[in-house]
Amino acid sequence: VLDWSQFVFVPGIREALKQLSSLGLPMIVISNQAAVGKGLLDLDGLKEITARMNGALLADGTSLAAAYYCPHRIEDDCPCRKPKPALLFSAANDFNIELSRSIFIGDSETDVQAARAAGCTPLLLGPGVHADSELKASNADLLASVTPHVLFQAAVKCLHNEIPVLSGN
């Protein structure tokens, strides 16, 4: 996504985020944005997209606490680019979050790795999770929420330790 006109919410995610916000816990976006490092998107453009996303969610009654981005390319090998956990640690420090009692919702292997490296419980979301047999095979013990429809229930189970906490290597 290089412009707001390209931004599309995953169907059902706005409702799921509204449900999650009812828990009163900080919801924080942590995302790799290599388009900035590649010169395809500038920081002002990224801030605008984020502000408009936030505005749309606020209209639903959903508030995000913050957004943390890694603007670097893969080859830059920076500590803030997922699967490395530096952005999760920064968010935890800024918001006094106990990572071992937190979940990290993502849609990729790098999200799972970042969550485990930070000591969070990873929760996979999205249709790609169901279709990616390699991702499923490498994370057979991982709770996967295939649709936003069941995200709230899955998150509550994670937060109540109804599944094992999966920690990093």
Image: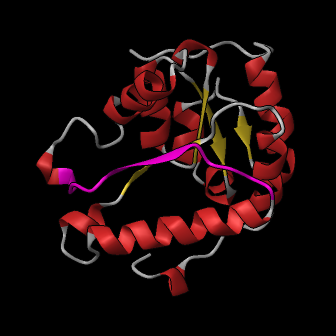
Query: In the figure, residue 77 lies in which quadrant?
Result: top left
Q: Where does residue 122 sit, x and y in percent of width and height?
A: 59, 30
**Residue at figure coordinates x 70%, y 62% from the top left:** 57
53 left or right of 169 in image: right
Q: Nearer the viewer, residue 108 or 88?
A: 88
User: Looking at the picture, does residue 77 appear above or below residue 60?
Assistant: above
Q: Nearer the viewer, residue 27 or 154?
A: 27
User: Looking at the picture, does residue 95 appear above or below residue 65?
Assistant: above
Q: In the rendered image, is residue 29 in sight?
A: no
Q: In the rendered image, is residue 63 in sight?
A: yes
User: Looking at the picture, does residue 148 appear above or below residue 141?
Assistant: below
Q: Nearer the viewer, residue 39 or 127?
A: 39
Residue 36 falls within the magenta-colored stretch: no
**Residue at figure coordinates x 35%, y 37% from the top left:** 83
Query: In the figure, residue 61 lies in which quadrant?
Result: bottom right
**Residue at figure coordinates x 57%, y 49% from the top left:** 107
Looking at the rendered image, the quarter that the N terminus falls into is bottom left
Looking at the rendered image, the quarter that the C terminus falls into is top left
Region in magenta: 61-74
Q: Where does residue 125 sit, x and y in percent of width and height?
A: 67, 48
Q: Where does residue 117 sit, x and y in percent of width and height?
A: 40, 22
Q: Nearer the viewer, residue 161 or 45?
A: 45
Q: Where does residue 168 sit, x and y in percent of width and height?
A: 43, 17
User: Looking at the picture, does residue 51 appear above or below residue 3?
Assistant: above
Residue 72 falls within the magenta-colored stretch: yes
**Residue at figure coordinates x 51%, y 19% from the top left:** 96
